[in-house]
C-alpha cells in the first residue's frame, strides 16, 4: 500500500514538474518572438512593452500558483489559457501593419 502511494506521488510530481517546464518553454519562446518582432520592425516599442508586461503578469501568476508548493490542475489550465491568449496577441501585433518608430 505504501509503495502504491509513493509511486503515485512520484508520478504526480513528475507530471507537475513537466507541466511547469512546458510553461517555462512556452514563455521563453514568446519572449523570443517578441524580441524578433522588435528586431525585424514588426513590433513598435509600445507594442513590445505591452507584450513584455503581459508576459510578466503571466510569470507572476505562475509564481503565485507555485507559492503554496502545489500547482493545481485548474491553475495550470488557467496559466496555459493565458499563454495561448498572449501567443495570439503577439501574432496580431506582429501582423497589424504598423511600423516601428
Image: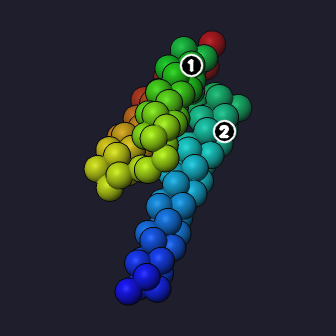
Is disc 2 placed on a helix, strand or loop? helix
For residue 74, side relative to residue 82 (left or right): left
Question: What residue appears at the point 45 percent right and 41 percent down from the top-left corner?
Answer: 68
Question: What residue appears at the point 43 percent right and 82 percent down from the top-left corner?
Answer: 2
Question: What residue appears at the point 70 percent right and 32 percent down from the top-left corner?
Answer: 39
Whether residue 58 can be seen here = no
Residue 22: x and y in percent read: 53, 58
For residue 9, side relative to residue 73 (left or right): right
Mark 1 burial class by Cα count in 10 Å: few <14, some 14-19, many 20+: few
Q: Which residue is mark 1?
A: 49
- Observer-side mark, 1 or 2, equals 1
Q: Quadrant of the C terminus?
A: top right
Is disc 1 placed on a helix, strand or loop? helix
Image quadrant where residue 32 sits: top right
Residue 58: x and y in percent read: 46, 34
Instruction: Please say if 23 is above or below 42.
Output: below
In this view of the protein, which residue sits in the foreground, 34 or 64?
A: 64
For residue 34, side relative to residue 89 (left or right): right
Residue 84: x and y in percent read: 38, 46
For residue 65, side relative to residue 34 (left or right): left
**Which residue extends farthest front?**
2
- Determine whether label 1 and label 2 are within 8 Å by CB: no
Q: Which residue is mark 2?
A: 36
Whether residue 37 can be seen here = yes
Residue 76: x and y in percent read: 38, 51
In this view of the protein, which residue sits in the foreground, 26 or 21?
A: 21
Question: What residue appears at the point 49 percent right and 38 percent down from the top-left corner?
Answer: 67
Mark 2 burial class by Cα count in 10 Å: few <14, some 14-19, many 20+: some
Instruction: Please say if 43 is above or below 16.
Output: above
**Which residue extends farthest right?**
39
Amino acid at each position: 500500500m505504501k509503495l502504491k502511494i509513493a509511486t503515485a506521488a512520484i508520478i504526480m510530481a513528475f507530471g507537475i514538474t513537466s507541466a511547469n517546464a512546458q510553461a517555462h518553454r512556452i514563455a521563453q519562446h514568446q519572449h523570443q518572438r517578441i524580441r524578433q518582432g522588435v528586431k525585424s520592425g514588426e513590433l513598435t516599442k509600445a507594442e513590445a512593452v505591452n507584450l513584455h508586461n503581459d508576459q510578466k503578469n503571466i510569470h507572476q501568476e505562475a509564481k503565485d500558483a507555485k507559492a503554496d508548493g502545489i500547482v493545481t490542475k485548474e491553475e495550470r489550465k488557467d496559466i496555459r489559457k493565458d499563454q495561448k491568449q498572449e501567443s495570439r496577441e503577439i501574432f496580431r501585433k506582429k501582423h497589424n501593419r504598423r511600423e516601428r518608430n
